[in-house]
Amino acid sequence: MDTGLLRDEAMQVAKSHGDGAVEPRHVLAALLVELGDRRPGELDATFVQGLLGSPGSAWQTPKPTDAAEALLAELAGASRDEAVQIAKRVAAAPPDAGVPKAGPKGSDGSGPAAAEHPPGDAQTSSETQAATTDGPATPVVRESTAQILAELDGLVGLASAKSAVHRTMAIQALNAERRKQGLPVVGASQHMVFVGPAGTGKTTVARIVARLYGSMGLLSKGHLVETGRADLVAGYVGQTAIKVQEAVERALGGVLFIDEAYALAGAGYNDFGAEAIATLVKLMEDHRDDLAVIVAGYPDEMRTFIESNPGLRSRFTTYVPFDDYSADDLMRIFGDMAAHAMVDLGPGVAEQARANVVVAMTSPSFGNARYVRGLFEEAYGRMAARVMADGTIDPGELSSMTRDDVPTVISGLVMDRSPIGFRPA
């Protein structure tokens, strides 16, 4: 089994369900999709729904647990027949092994209750792909397109990006229906260029687009593989094409996302970035029926990147703009991070955080949501130092962030007023 692909898909599954860590159940869900028509019949869409629960949105990239890593290591040397047996064994594992059994809660003490998933509320559905020459039709677990679009609309800000994605999906849906009716379609590439400043949610939206393509049947899997220059460009002759090929193979059936893609171009005559671009263009054509590529970066730099190769210009015709967040948007993100971490914001915390944000927004290198994440984590660190200063932890302090935990802004600079040493007894 290709455990690199399984790892990426499992991370995507965990992320899309609001889970902060990749557990064996996420690996199992990814494995069942990978097995296709070899998947055991009892491990169907209903089982996967019970396995994962309701979709959500984790704001940090999930990391595999030790148990998930052990499962991936076991699958690394497994044939497809062996993988089927492993899937059955993991599915039958007790709840304390990190893999809840499917079924209504209360029937065996595990799995989400059916009432938690009312009709239309973030469910998955089982669709059937067209039959292949190798055998019968393959059942594929698909999310509802409407559900995923609702998740997109629920993101903070990003009005321009949301509008562009909605328009693109409408074009793809219209073309799909026209094909069914035997009508000609207007060419619409599935590849996209995301342009905007740092920290504006480009990676998050790319994950959603991948899932949308999967739900609409435009791509066979709908997963996302994140890459950058280091993943595609080698330092030796003949190695770059291999790295690009490997990345594309992992992304087949889904989206290859290249962040800061402009770094592939313009690095000197002896740089291998141009080779990476040329190889990518060829593979995009070779796999045009089951691969989408999304490139992202700053507007000016991305314009230079697209112009660096005629093949890029002809394939990337859909541009999605990402604007800076407003101060109100950023404070909503700050509040969401606190809620996700189950941290209560005391009096003055929001005001102090906003003061930092307003000043930081004047910097040319402002990181938008990345800055807010850093601000929240710094405040949490100061909160931890305060709570632990006397060597004991008061239960009432576990979840309370105070105004003094947030850095103070003075003359445009963030000042740290934390006292050195322990507070008086």
Image (tube, rainbow, N blue to C red):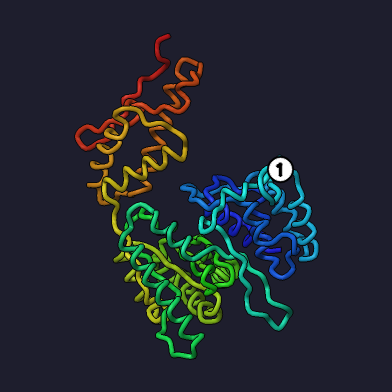
Quadrant (top left/top right/bottom left/bottom right) for the N terminus: bottom right
Q: Residue at x 74, y 52 (%)?
A: 91
Element under disc 1: helix
- As rendered, which of 278 and 162 lies closer to the eye? 162
Is residue 257 at all visible to an observer of this figure? yes
- As rendered, which of 415 and 1 lies closer to the eye? 1
Residue 382 horizontal/vertical position (percent): 40, 28
Q: Is residue 280 above or below residue 148?
A: below
Residue 333 horizontal/vertical position (percent): 36, 45
Is residue 239 at all visible to an observer of this figure? no
Q: Which residue is mark 1?
A: 95
Q: Residue at x 52, y 74 (%)?
A: 218
User: Disc 1 residue type?
Assistant: Pro
Q: Is residue 175 above or below residue 71?
A: below
Quadrant of res 294: bottom left
Quadrant of res 266: bottom left
Residue 419 horizontal/vertical position (percent): 35, 20
